Structures are given as structure tokens and as C-alpha cells.
Image (spheres, grey):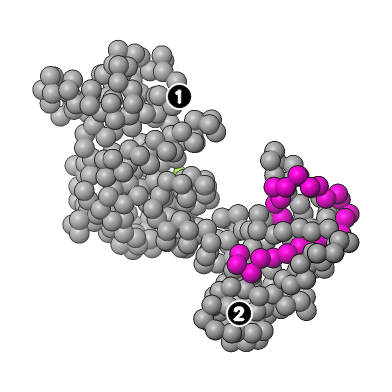
Amino acid sequence: MTELKLQNLVKRFGDVIAVDDVSMTVPSGGFVALLGYSGCGKTTSLRMIAGLEEPTEGDILFDNETVLHLAPNHRNIGMIFQRYVLFPHMNVEKNVGFGLRMKGVDRNEIRKRVKEVLDVVQLAGYEKRFPSQLSGGQQQRIAIARTVITNPKLLLMDEPLSNLDAKLREEMRSFITDLQKRLNITTMFVTHDQIEAIELADHIGVMFDGKIVQYGPPEDIFNRPATPEIADFMGATNLIKGNLIEKDNATRCAISVQNQRFDVMVDSPHEVGTPVISTIRPEHIELHPAVKDGAPTQNILNAKIKSAVYHGGTLSYYLQAGDIELQARDQSTRRFSEGEEVVAHLNPEHLWIFPEAGNGA
Ligand SMILES: Nc1ncnc2c1ncn2[C@@H]1O[C@H](COP(=O)(O)OP(=O)(O)OP(=O)(O)O)[C@@H](O)[C@H]1O
Ligand SMILES: [Mg+2]
């Protein structure tokens, strides 16, 4: 097992800063996802770790020793790409054993190790098949087998599931989680898919414009985004401007939005009177018919349904509440129609406010 450390890593391509002062540590046996928009610098980061790209500045350390002087084949890294290329003219056994053959490992030993690793990826008995005789998911598992058979210090995966259909992708997610735990191999996984990062990784580094803007466990990134941009990227699309009007104790505060009071179940480091941005995920906004008795009277906005989009199982509503546009997601069978007046309840437990008032918004 190996600890991976990136120290003030920078990569420039001419005027483009692809990776901008990235520092992070992946603990030995840890599973970190680099998550960010297309073009934010994820692949470039992986390529520098693998030795395929030279950093402009900064350092890369395995177990506290720099590897910058080491060529890719001396870093002992397993890399799995979105477009995994199996050798089409070789059967599974030859494909999986390729790395060991290159190292001059004995033929019987190779056969034994191939058998072991095919067991691990649940494809025992597929030795004689050719890639064209395998499904997409099976090919991907063979690509993984071929990589892990060499016992790499690190596993680097660059969007390995994005070519698979939705169902297979889900299967492969749990397969990769299990495999990573079983082999206990330090892993960095690159994706632009929030759900994938949350399901797979024990820590997520959110990357925007070459910078790590937040690093932490998935629950933190999901429930306590550091900035409005991260909240938006993680699907908490409602950003509501307000003012801090009350601080009770370490667990709650209150904000005012359009002269309505909203309780929020988080502490605020700010002074009363500070402008804040508050956010809530669409699935945490509860809608009630405005005309009915029994609708909540606290933490509410009176709103009008602008439009509704059916997703299969859930409905997204776009709402107008004064100057504020909101998105709500509803799983119930009840339907609201366009133009209908509703009461939108913002659950105090699910409201979150940003420590840096107005920062970057
Ligand atoms: N060899 C290169 N020469 C010039 N610019 C490059 C080179 N490689 C990458 N870039 C630029 O660096 C930035 C980061 O690219 P990178 O491939 O790391 O993004 P990414 O996060 O992997 O994106 P995606 O999700 O689309 O794969 C982009 O603006 C890209 O155009
Ligand atoms: Mg990429």
C-alpha cells in the first residue's frame, strides 16, 4: 500500500493553466474521486501522477518520496481509461497476462496468477474467449484484471464507466468498490458524475478550473458545500439570497428572505445583519396546496407553479416566489398544475448557508 501526495502541483500548456496549485493526500488504501466539469484538469492530473506528463511546478510523492525523476514504467501504476483497449487478437488469458509476460514472469506462474485475478473479477473460465466475444462490462472487467495483476502501487481510473449503459454502470460501480476494498489499493478515480463519485469514493476532491475547491467525505460535499458554485454543481440548485437576522446558539440561526423568517439548523459564524446565500436541494422542498388548511406556516414561501417536468417516478416543479425562482422535486402521486398557487416549505434541517456571505455568487 502506498500513500500518494500531490504538493502544489501546476501544469501549464502555453497560456492554459490546466492544473493550478493542487495539493492533496490520498492515504494508503484510500479511494479518492476527482470530480469536476469537463476540461477542469482531471485527466492532466492523472497523467502527471502516471508520469505521462511533466508538472510545470510542484511535486508528486509516493510514501513521502518524490517520483518526478521516475519514468512511467518505473512508477508501478495501474491506469484504466474510458477507452480500454484490449488486444483484439489475443484471448482473455493472453490479454490479462500481458504485463507479466513483459516482465519475463514464468509461464506457469502467469497462468496461475491469471486464474486468480479472473476469479477476483468474477470471470473465471473465460480464459479462451476473445474480446469480441465479451460484453462491454466483461471487457471492462478484463481491462481491470489486466491492470491489477501486476500489483500496482496505485490505481488510477479515468472515467472508466462512461462508455457503459446506465444499468451496467451501476453494476460496475459496486464491483469497483468491492474490488478496491478487497485489494486495498490506493485509488484515484476521475469522473464528472456526482453520483458516481459519491457512491465510490471515501473522499472527493471537487475540481474547478484546475483548482481543488473542496476536499472531504462525500456527505460533506453533498450536504455542506463550501460555495454556491459547488452547491449548484452537486445538484442543490436553489440559491436564495437573504440576511442573517438571529443567532441563537451553536446549532441554529435565522435568516430573512423577502421579509419572511426562516430557521436554519446550522451555526453561522457571521454577525447579525450579514447578507448570506442559503441553499436547499430540490428534493427537500415540500409543496402544499395554498388553499388548504394544515399547510405549514413556518419556513414557507408562497409560490406559483411555472412549469412541471416528469422524470419517471419524480416530478420537477419550477416555481416563482416573488423574485425568487425555485426548483422542487416531488415523489408523491399528487400533481400540481401550471399556474397553481402553492406553499413551499423549506425544511430547516435541510437549509444550508454559506460561511462566506455572497462569495463568488
Ligand atoms: N496537451 C495539451 N495541450 C494543450 N492544452 C491541453 C493539453 N491537454 C489538456 N489541455 C487543456 O487543459 C485543460 C484540462 O484538460 P483535461 O484533459 O485535464 O480536462 P478533464 O478534466 O480531464 O476534462 P474531461 O472531463 O473533458 O475529460 C483543458 O482546457 C484542455 O484543453
Ligand atoms: Mg479527462
Residue bounds of the magenta highlight: 327-350
Q: Nearer the viewer, residue 339 or 41?
A: 339
Horizontal placement of 344 versus 167: left or right?
Answer: right
Residue at the (26%, 45%) spot, across then down:
184
**Residue 272, quarter of the rendered image:** bottom right
Magenta stretch contains residue 328: yes
**Residue 175 drawn above or below residue 286:** above
- Which residue carries the number 1 mark? 136
**Residue 278 drawn above or below residue 37:** below
Residue at the (41%, 15%) spot, across then down:
132
Q: Is mark 2 within 8 Å of ligand 1?
A: no
**Residue 300, quarter of the rendered image:** bottom right
Mark number for residue 199?
none
- Which residue carries the number 2 mark? 253
Task: Report x, y in % for residue 104.
Answer: 12, 26
Task: Report x, y in % for residue 326.
Answer: 74, 60
Residue lying furthest left: 106
Indicate the secondary structure of the residue bearing disc 1.
Answer: helix
